[in-house]
Image: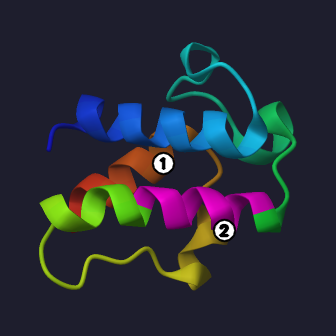
């Protein structure tokens, strides 16, 4: 998958969990500062992203819980997921 395709998946997951317009979510959008996403929301977003990307990824594709704190923006999350696909 391309980074733009992964971005679309993350945008949709964010929109679903935080009830926002996916078009309002860009690579520069920060989860906590811009979206006020708490840790529970981030876990829900990750679960949707994993479920969506798993059939298209290498076996064992997973976003580590320990890495969530280091993913401050949507762009960082996209880059993280692309690197593991």
- Residue drawn at 44 percent across, 74 percent down: 63
- Residue drawn at 50 percent across, 58 percent down: 48
Q: Residues within 10 Å of mark 1 (few under 14, many from 20)?
A: some
- Residue drawn at 80 percent across, 31 percent down: 34
Q: Is residue 85 visible?
A: no
Say which label, 1 or 2, has the lower sequence index: 2
Is 47 included in the stretch rendered in magenta? yes
Task: Check residue 12 in the rendering and tell me which mark sits there, or answer none.
Answer: none
Q: Residue 61: which quarter of the image?
A: bottom left
Q: Is residue 16 left or right of residue 36?
A: left
- The one nearer the camera, 27 or 15, is 15
Position of residue 14 measured from the top left corner of the image (x, y, whole percent)? 62, 40
Say which residue label 1 marks. Answer: 76
Q: Secondary structure at mark 2?
A: helix
Task: Check residue 43 in the rendering and tell me which mark sits there, or answer none.
Answer: 2
Q: Residues within 10 Å of mark 2 (few under 14, many from 20)?
A: some
Q: Is residue 67 above or below residue 12?
A: below
Q: Which residues are magenta?
A: 41-49
Q: Secondary structure at mark 1?
A: helix
- Residue drawn at 34 percent across, 56 percent down: 52
């Amino acid at each position: 998958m391309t980074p733009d395709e992964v971005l679309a998946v993350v945008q949709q997951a964010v929109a679903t969990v935080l009830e926002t317009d996916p078009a309002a979510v860009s690579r520069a959008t920060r989860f906590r500062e811009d979206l006020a996403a708490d840790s529970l929301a981030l876990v829900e977003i990750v679960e949707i992203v994993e479920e969506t990307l798993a059939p298209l990824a290498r076996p064992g594709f997973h976003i580590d819980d320990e890495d969530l704190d280091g993913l401050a923006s949507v762009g960082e999350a996209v880059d993280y997921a692309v690197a593991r696909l």
